[in-house]
Image (spheres, grey):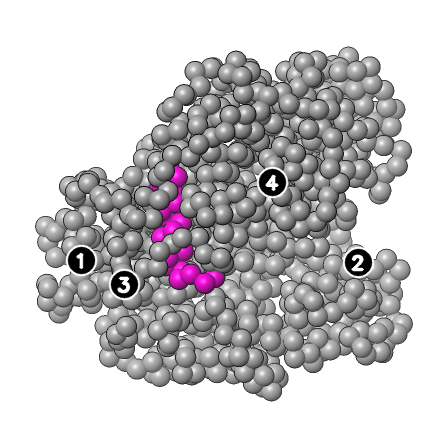
Amino acid sequence: MNRKRFLQAGSLATASLLLPRFLKAVERPVMVPPGNKVLVVLQLSGGNDGLNTVIPVRNDIYYRSRPHLGIEKDRAALITDEVGLHPALTGLKGLYDDGSLGILSSVGYPNPDRSHFRSMDIWQTASDSRQYLSTGWLGRYLDAQCSGCGRPTQVLEIDDVVSLALKGEQFKGMALKDPRRLYTASHEDYFREIMAAHQGDPGAALPVATAAHEAERPVDYLYKTMATTLSGADYIFEQSKLRPSSASYPNTELGKNLHTIASLILSDINTRVYYLSLGSFDTHVNQAAQQQRLFTELNDAVGAFVADLKANHRFEDSLLVTFSEFGRRVTQNASGGTDHGTANTMFLIGGGLQRKGLVNNLPDLENLVEGDLKYQVDFKDVYATILNKWLGADDKSILGRQSAYLDFI
Amino acid sequence: MDLTNQRRNQHLFWRAGFGPMAEDLNALATHTQKSFTEALWKASDRPVAYLDVVDNALKGLVMGAGDVAVLQRKELSADEKKQIRVQSRQDIKSLNLAWLAEMVNSDAQMREKMALFWHGHFASRNVNIFYQQLLLDTIRKGALGNFGDLLKEVSKSAAMLNFLNNNQNKKDHPNENFAREVMELFTMGRGHYTEEDVREGARAFTGWGASLNGEFIFRKGQHDEGQKTFLGKTGRFDGDDVLNLLLEQKQTSLYITRKLYRYLVNEQVDEARVQGLADRWYQSNYDISSLLKDIFHSDWWYDPRNIGSRIKSPVDLLAGIRRLLPMKIANEEVQLALQRLLGQLLFYPPNVAGWPGGANWIDSSTLMFRLRIPELIYASGEFHLRPKDDDDQMMGMREGGEVAGVPAMAGGKKGRMGGGGGQMIRAEIDWVPYLKRFEQVPDEQLFAAISGIVLQTPSGPGESLVKKYVTGDNREEFIKAATIRLMSTPEYQLC
């Protein structure tokens, strides 16, 4: 039997399905309050070189440490007499001039880890460097938001695979590349029907959110995940058609993904956080060309995204932040690249910034720890600020710590 | 629930191994659990063959010089270093597939199942294929032996010493990483020792290191000979002493037993039961086989609450499908993509704590992909999913050598693409042994018979529902299609 015939067998089946009880409760419209704040987290995977992103163009140590890789003042996109952005980031310079760009320098954490996956874990789970957590900071936000809600669409990732950052104890954020594709993939009648049958199974417990899913039968947990996925797929697709963005975006993966996000931001969807990645910034070799290419993609896509949101009056309510698992060493290596380092730069982009431009001082290149930057700002304080001041969430319970809020929003 | 002999046997095969083999299906209904358990032990008693996948050129490059001293990295040219890195990564893929093949084909199911447990317990990431291969061998050989011996061998392995930075743990500059993880993850678990114990333990491990070709080295000059106070005892302890002191702690037996209970029996831990098992294991001086026998022979091992209640790990799932439906996979490497998309790539645990398991395996993407895999295998469908980049693995390069960050997947490796630009599983199932099982089954019992083989849960999709999605032109086609449909369910994710 070939695939076509195998699938045809399914389409012969009745398409009219009883909506399971559980989903009926979920299908009620969700009202989006006006002025709904939205967060977009852009992960620069691989360890972006922060010093060639925000360049201290009058710092001799910088140029001495990077005789080949250092970016000359006249090539940089200058934002002040002392600071330039990477030459590819001209659009971000425009945002700076506009008052829509904030720059946080030397963001990191104590006892930094130089392994990609470990340091990424630390950033995604918001753990200490000696702590192993199996939930992410946005997943725990989702748990708090979706308590009793049944459909975890408050946090979405534009990807094929869900990042640890979005996995909570109760709920896990959904990942999708394209609302239509997710809808089509989940719309196999067979899946819908076995789900409906399970819901009708008297042995199946009603999958209302339990206090701890340990108490629920694993089979119910699986069906609950299936139900929320299928219902979420329908909901996201419906919303994506509501007011699709007609703006033009660059034909890159990041461009397409931000276009998808823009269409959802313009809809009535209840999503507050979008997550996506760009990479790889792991520039051990031939850094100049690779960073140039990735930053061009970033610059053009973010430029189109900002213009789109502005035209639709959603920019004031949107905040895009970038992060990377670590920065790179101050000194260039012998292969035209840089090796894994520590503290790093974060961009904050939005129409609602309270502090614009350079939020804190540039990295102090005179005070290094074994050739690496010392962190000045704990990234968990940045998260806390965003959770508390932007998303109105209880950062203390989500992060499990008392944080020092920053004043950029 | 009506617990048939067959279901009990399937339970044994799923928990003490990777599920029943097609060839064994006929015996499942008639053989006793006792006879199968004995057969499993016997098969796992045989000596373990060393899995050696290292490319000969790489061996020449790294081992050829003979003398470890000339192998110091600085004496290799940049090109040679790169060659080593690239080949090493390629060989780790081969090791992954070779081990997966053992899980599928070997009769020593118990050994491989326990080796997978220890692979997650003694989690280590390493780009050095020699280290990986040696550690895997240690784990497979010691999987059913004495836990103390295994702990010591792993602690002296190049993979672990390197991964946990013990090469940097020196008398005057202690590095606490190794000592901390040995206590937190390998033996007692968090909350049973102090920071002072970590510092003192680290001093005991100073001087433990490994050579490039994977041999344990004790660097006497870097070892701190002084007195240490560790877990309330004082002496001039070295690393072995510290490991022995950790084994003396009953907490160690409790911590490992609880973890193993969750792996083999149920995510819901019965603490009293675990305490009893742990006490007896401690009495046996950590004999892993005694602990397993204690579990397999207990009256609750076949308790309905423990059957069909565990979420299969991605490796359980993939190996289990291949055991039930023997197949040739033309593009074997596609299995690495499946492992990555499902969240369990062998040799790349997410962190030093290993794969968290249980409900953590399941999110919207992994569940929907799990439900599609049987059909992808059966009907050679394409999937368009791309796993996340792993920068530790790729060092800025995409698989196949292109520079990472190139937007499209198109133009990737030859042969793995389908016509629509996605990936395909080019598998050919040998249905003969599987179909044999149903030869004597009357038509009206056929669906129940298939469901009883495929699913371990008390209930699943009913016959009338599944039949709507199965063309029934003939009996064989019906068995095949119904099997694939039953595998494409949440219930099949459980064992």
Both labels 2 and 4 in a single chain: no
Q: Mark 4 points at which residue?
A: A393
Considering the whole magenta stretch, tell me its main secondary structure: helix
In the rendered view, tell whether residue B278 sits above or below residue A182. Answer: below
Q: In this view, does B379 lie to the left or right of A245?
A: left
Residue at point 41% right, 21% down?
A244
Chain at numbered mark 3: B
Q: How far apart are marks 2 and 4 (CA)?
A: 38 Å
- The quarter of the rendered structure image containing the N terminus of chain B is bottom left
Q: Mark 2 lies on which chain?
A: B
Tell me if residue A301 is in the magenta stretch.
Answer: no
- The chain letter for the residue carrying disc 1 is B
Residue type indicated by callout 4: Ala
SS under mark 1: helix
What is the spatial separation of the Cα atoms under label 3 and label 2, in whole angstroms? 53 Å
The x and y percentages for residue A270 are 47, 34
Say if labels 3 and 4 share a chain: no
The span from disc 1 to disc 2 (Cα, nearest Å) is 61 Å
- Magenta extent: A214-233
The residue positioned farthest toward the bottom in the image shown: B283
Q: Residue at x 27, y 61 (%)?
A: A202
Instruction: Please name whichever residue, B237 or B214, is drawn nearer the observer in this view of the structure.
Output: B237
Mark 2, mark 4: which one is toward the viewer? 4
Q: Which residue is drawn at 53% across and 75% down?
A: B271
